[in-house]
Image (cartoon, rainbow, N blue to C red):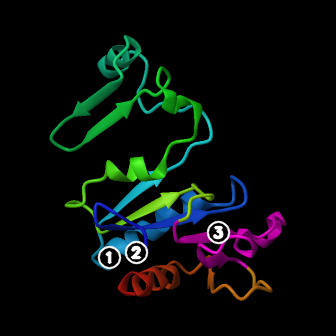
Amino acid sequence: MLKTNNIPVLGFCAHSSGIGKTTLLTQLIPALIHQGLRISVVKHAHHEFDIDHEGKDSFKLRKAGAVQMMVASRQRWALMTELVHTPLAENEPNLAHLLDQMDGNLVDLVLAEGFKHEPIPKIEVHRAAFGTPLLAAEDVNIIAIATDAPLPISTPQIDLNDINAIAAFIHTWLKK
């Protein structure tokens, strides 16, 4: 089991976008919290994105050239790092580096959404109606498939619509 800052990491992947990874995670996180786990998420984005908004001070400071911009309040803090003018901008984000940014004192499990090519334990999200090939057929790091239909593969399968069963599978996996 891959750990960062002594935190276990579990990926959620799919053959393509739009299959429902985020939808699954938004339902799964409360179930895992109900089991007493503190959860963090690292999400891979395939496109340019912005969590800051034009007109805000943090946006102005970042656009002025700050390589890192942290916004902090009583309730939360967020660190934005610009990679545009660094050698890191030429490649996809390095998951190990991103995970090193997590605070091991605040979390029991990191869920990594996307990052399908990373050698971490993963649950594949599969919907039969999409007709996409299974990643599990080629990826030995996929420990289960959350699916809406039975599949002809020996990898453990969990009903995609049974959030409690997926949470129970993760809880059992964490104990190993």
**Which residue in the protein does label 1 denote?**
34
Q: Find the magenta span and give its range.
A: 120-148
Circle nearer the viewer, 1 or 3? 3
Say if the magenta span includes residue 13. no
Disc 1: CA contacts within 10 A as few (<14), some (14-19) or many (>=20): few
The answer to the question of whether label 1 and label 2 lie on touching residues, with beta carbons closer than 8 A, is: yes
Distance CA(mark 1)–CA(mark 2)? 5 Å
Camera-side residue: 85 or 29? 85
**Which residue in the protein does label 2 denote?**
31
Percent x, y for residue 92? 57, 41
Disc 1 marks a residue whose amino acid type is His
Disc 3 marks a residue whose amino acid type is Val
Label disc, if present, on residue 52 of the rendered structure: none
Q: Image quadrant of residue 65? A: top left
Q: Residue at x 38, y 74 (%)?
A: 32
Say if the magenta span includes residue 137. yes
Label disc, if present, on residue 125 of the rendered structure: 3
Specify which label sits upstream in the sequence, 3 or 2.
2
Q: Left or right: where does residue 72 sit relative to residue 9?
A: left
Percent x, y for residue 58? 31, 22
Q: Left or right: where does residue 170 sit relative to residue 106?
A: right
The answer to the question of whether label 3 and label 2 lie on touching residues, with beta carbons closer than 8 A, is: no
Disc 2 marks a residue whose amino acid type is Ala
